[in-house]
Image (cartoon, grey):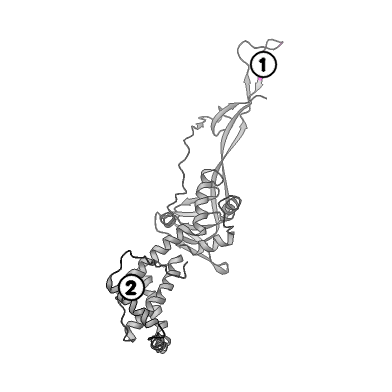
Amino acid sequence: MSRIIVCEVPKPKERLQKEIDLFNTLKEIEDPDKIGLSNVLFEILQLRPLVMDHFRRLKQQAYDEFKRSLTNVGEIDHLMKTASLFFATYRLIQDYTTLKLPFTCDEFFKIASEKIKFQVELISKTDKLATFFKAMDVMIDSKAIREGRDFAIDTPKRITIKMPGGEKKEITLPAGTRILFLRLTYIYTQFARSSYNSEDSTQSTIEQNLRSHPSYIGLVHSHRFNYYDVVEIPRGGFVEGTQGESDAWGDIPIATDNTMVRKMEKRFHNSSCVALNYDIFRELYDIDLKRAVDDIPVYVSDSQDDDPLGGCFTKEQKLAF
């Protein structure tokens, strides 16, 4: 998809008489029993020395013009190189031949730039990577993937990425730049088990597509992922029996407090991950991976003595033992 330029050719409902006449003339020329196109082929072949002498330079100039006009990242870079082939051909015909084309250089450049932007958006919404992120969005809602544990969105001042050959490079980020950190191996495992991977995309395919994506920053060797797990534990300690209860000696019985409480335990792990520019990611995919924090009432003990667990709890539950 990045090696071609997609051009729609709509079929008009009504053609102008001039267009019909030109088409009929071309068909007559095409007929080998009348004129044929051999003379046109010979004329084009005469351009071969010009192509050999000037095309490489013109192609580089065209590519440089696209780079100044467009963001040079990911699939856009491949498409700019493809469009440069056509733009250089136009420049060659315009500057070194007597052939005339029915459009100007500026018109061609504007159309090519619009085609590149359109195609990048098309790729981002129809390729395997788009399917992967749409599935990830659903798996977040189903709790198969969790923010903090499997991915994180943060605004670091700088990140260190791993370069080919094991070298490291520190990248300073503009203030407020949101970065998406993905534990790709774990997320892909969940994706591969799901019904969303209908095309049997491999992890290497996803990684390769990510590397050519406009939002891709690089591979981070180690990133700290912080998250919370809910655990149920007995409150412990002792409680007195209810008023009126007594044992054989007349004493009020003492029982173990088996009330189960939920405690939010903070966990973390360091893991390699992939870093993406989250703002570019959102613009291309129109997917927001962040979720609102659940509004769960939390009890915080004012005193460690009153609460032997000394933590945050929700939904106390009395269990029979």
User: Looking at the rendered structure, which numbered label has been put on residue 108?
Assistant: 2
In the current view of this chain or complex, which residue is farthest to the front? 33
Q: In the depicted view, which residue is nearer to us: 35 or 79?
A: 35
**Overall secondary structure of the magenta section:** loop
Please say if 179 is above or below 47.
above
Q: Is residue 301 magenta?
A: no
Instruction: Name the residue beneath numbered marker 1.
Output: 253
Q: Which residue sits at x=58%, y=27%? A: 317
Q: Which mark is residue 70?
A: none
Q: Secondary structure at mark 2?
A: helix
Estimate the spatial distance between the alpha carbons at disc 1 and disc 2, rounded to whole Å.
Answer: 92 Å
Q: Which residues are magenta?
A: 247-254
Q: Is residue 262 visible?
A: yes
Left or right: residue 143 compared with residue 50: right
Q: Quadrant of the C terminus?
A: top right
> How far across and down, in percent of the image, does residue 304 sit?
55, 31
